[in-house]
Amino acid sequence: MLPTTPQGYEEIVSAFRWDIPAHYNIGVDVCDKWAAQQPGRLALVHVDQHGCAQHYSFGRIKTLSDRMANLLRAHGAGVGARVAVLLPQSPEAAFSHVAAYKAGCIAIPLFSLFGTEALQYRLQDSATTVVVTNADGAAKLAQIRHTLPQLRAVLCSDGAAPGALDLHAELALHSDRFTAVDTRADDPALIIYTSGTTGQPKGALHAHRVLLGHLPGVEMSHNLFPMAGDRIWTPADWAWIGGLLDVLLPAWHHGVAVVAHRFAKFSGEAAFQLLQDQQVRNCFLPPTALKMMRTVPAPRERWQLALRSVASGGESLGAELLEWGRQTFGLTINEFYGQTECNMTVSSNGAIMPVRPGSIGRAAPGHRVEIVDDGGQLLPVGAHGNIAVLRPDPVMFLQYWNKPEATAGKFAGDWLLTGDTGSKDADGYIRFVGRDDDVITSAGYRIGPGEIEDNLLQHPAVKMAAVIGAPDAERTEIVVAIVVLNAGRVGSDDLKREIQQHVRTRLAAHEYPREVYFVEELPMTTTGKVIRRELRAMVQQWRQDAGPGSN
């Protein structure tokens, strides 16, 4: 871990060395280690929708995760079996992850707002054996269960449901003693699905060592985390790498308590209230959350905060938002950078180095991040090129699940190409310029157009469709669909709403197109590829012509 007393960035980097053991298990590290040393140590504060808090010790998490591991075994989830966790932030989500790792299974975090089509693809592609979910998830799975021959059991945290067993009743039938699998650090631990620009999502397969690989970036972005009294929270769902591996698991590695709460609908006022009530000391706030909190008047007069660090990632923060953070929190928001395949490789830290507006920070200790050309050749200082990370690196993914060609295409020699472009100055500060691909960044989510386009084509009125991102003041970008209709169909506001609902219910609420445009044909290259830059220009013109509030 990094030193917890302030030192210069250069001194910390030069002294850093990786310590990755040959054998390592995430579940043992984040739970059993602490349960053996300090079973009563606080692990989780779960705040329900009424504001009531329930506390879980590491000893209790061990008991629950051991029962869960035995339950997984009883349903045929052996070493290497895929176990999906389709839950919001909750104790059940946390101890299910720990159990899967201890059992040598491969955990698959899934967003609770995914629709049936999004779930079906991911569960089919991974050949998932067991799903842990709630009543909402069980109802969705019941609709697609017949298409999932590998799925042996659905365990529901809200009690028995059609096609689902009562999770807690099942847990009570199993022993609270389980011997964790002696996994190697390079053994698979989890698959996180990430959207690309074409086709269906890809499953980034990570090894157990991925947690250790995250630690320098987490510690740096939280002002040399942990320190006495630290307690961490994020509104980011644990189904995404930002919630799971930037907050929950690294905090538990260090024995730091995590606050868990699912907002029915996020609001700035509610976020400030939670920070105060739970005396949160550290938080990861995505840019959209910060922007919503920024609209709240006089927060320093209304709430007494105890924050020591605020980290943010997913999009670049502007100078204005950083200054608001200083005035509101009394500290500098530390930006960090990464992606599902190779996360937390760049970070800023106002405690140990100057923060330069427009920069996303410098390489976190232990990671080599450079600017290279498409062939993997280093570019000179200040040149624009691909942001790339050198392998081997413990935070780097093993491969895309069942996609060897896509895995090979992610690298240029030993450089993992992030797909983002930028530049690097003489002091190592990296400036994010843009994305080489067409992934849409909306409200902190990275959304690939491919899956949405596939879904749109299933609507009976749609002949062809293309999806792009368009600038939005609150969400950074919004999803925009440009649609060619089948013969005999006429575009209308009602059809737009129908198409939007089609995507919203089958994929996810954050993926539906907030704007829909009808065209006679899409701009194409001679090889049949959609020219997205022309679509962006068209949408920009349509928006200007229509004025605010249209579509």
Image: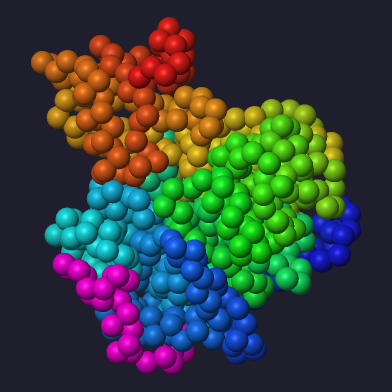
Main secondary structure along the magenta-highlighted residues: loop
- Where residue 499 appears, x then y in whole percent? 24, 30
Foreground pick, 374 / 529: 529
User: Is 242 positioned to the left or the right of 144 in the image?
Assistant: right
The percent position of residue 456, horizontal first and vertical second, equals 26, 32
The quadrant of the rendering that contains the N terminus is bottom right
Q: Please report the residue visible at 17 percent of the width from the left and 55 percent of the height from the top.
A: 143
Where's residue 53, x and y in %? 51, 70
Q: Residue furthest front?
A: 302
| In front of the other: 352 or 305 | 305
Residue pictured at 58% horizontal, 76% vertical: 43
Magenta stretch: includes residue 176:
yes
Q: Is residue 67 above or below residue 425?
A: below
Residue toward you, 327 or 428: 327
Q: Is residue 465 visible?
A: yes
The number of numbered discs placed on residues in the rendered structure image is 0
Residue 101, can we see it? no
Q: Position of residue 21 (x, y in %)?
A: 64, 76
Location of residue 34 with respect to 230 vertically, above or below: below
For the record, the magenta segment spans 155-180
User: Does residue 351 appear to the left or right of 538 in the view shown?
Assistant: right
* Residue depicted at 32% across the width and 80% down the height: 168
Residue at image location 38% in from the left, 46% down from the top: 201
Magenta region includes residue 480: no
Asked if residue 414 is positioned above or below residue 48 in the image, the reply reads: above
- The quadrant holding residue 23 is bottom right
